[in-house]
Image (cartoon, rainbow, N blue to C red):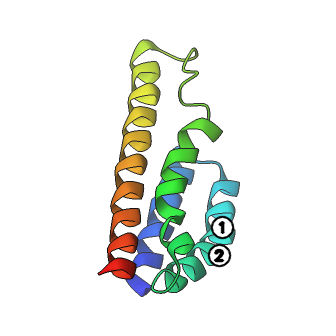
Amino acid sequence: MGILLLTITLHYAVGIAVGSVPPDGFVAAAVFGIPLGFAGVAAHSSLIARLVLPLGMLAEPWVTRRFCGFYGTVPEQVSEIASGVILTLSGVILAVVVMRRGYRRHHD
């Protein structure tokens, strides 16, 4: 837990220092990290909790409008769209894996 907190703090500190992350981004990560941590603890017994990560991966590109990359330079647009596609596909694959493992646990 300590190393994770250290790496997250360093990640946001560097981002804030270079201007790529607004200071409120760190506060939001800390606030949302607490309920997500509880979901991780509950993931041992709850299918819904195990689906938090894949559903977050599916929702994030749509919530942050990564597929509407009509701003910035062409490389920025391509990067936004590519990261949205990668997150969406990864979320779908992970959700299928989680659902199959949950099904197997209850039917084997």
User: Are the residues tagged 1 and 2 within 8 Å (C-beta)?
Assistant: yes
Q: Nearer the viewer, residue 102 or 51?
A: 102
Left or right: residue 1 compared with residue 28: left
Query: Whole-percent x and y of residue 93?
Result: 34, 50
Element carrying mark 1: helix
* Dot 1 alpha-carbon crowd within 10 angstroms: few under 14, some 14 to 19, many 20 or more: few
User: In this figure, which residue is indicated by the disc labeled 1?
Assistant: 32
Q: Is the residue 81 above or below the residue 24 in the image?
A: above
User: In this figure, which residue is indicated by the disc labeled 2?
Assistant: 35
Query: Whole-percent x and y of residue 84?
Result: 46, 35
Say which mark, if any, is on residue 78.
none
Q: Residue furthest front?
A: 107
Q: Is the residue 56 above or below the residue 46 in the image?
A: above
Q: Residue at x 64, y 55 (%)?
A: 25
Residue type, label 2: Pro
Q: Residue at x 41, y 47 (%)?
A: 92
Q: Quadrant of the C terminus?
A: bottom left
Query: Whole-percent x and y of residue 14?
Result: 47, 56
Query: Whole-percent x and y of residue 34?
Result: 63, 77
Q: CA distance from mark 1 to mark 2?
A: 6 Å
Figure quadrant of residue 102: bottom left
Residue type, label 1: Phe
Q: Residue furthest left?
A: 108
Q: Nearer the viewer, residue 54 or 13?
A: 54
| Whether residue 81 is visible | yes
Element carrying mark 2: helix
Left or right: residue 59 compared with residue 105: right
* Dot 2 alpha-carbon crowd within 10 angstroms: few under 14, some 14 to 19, many 20 or more: few
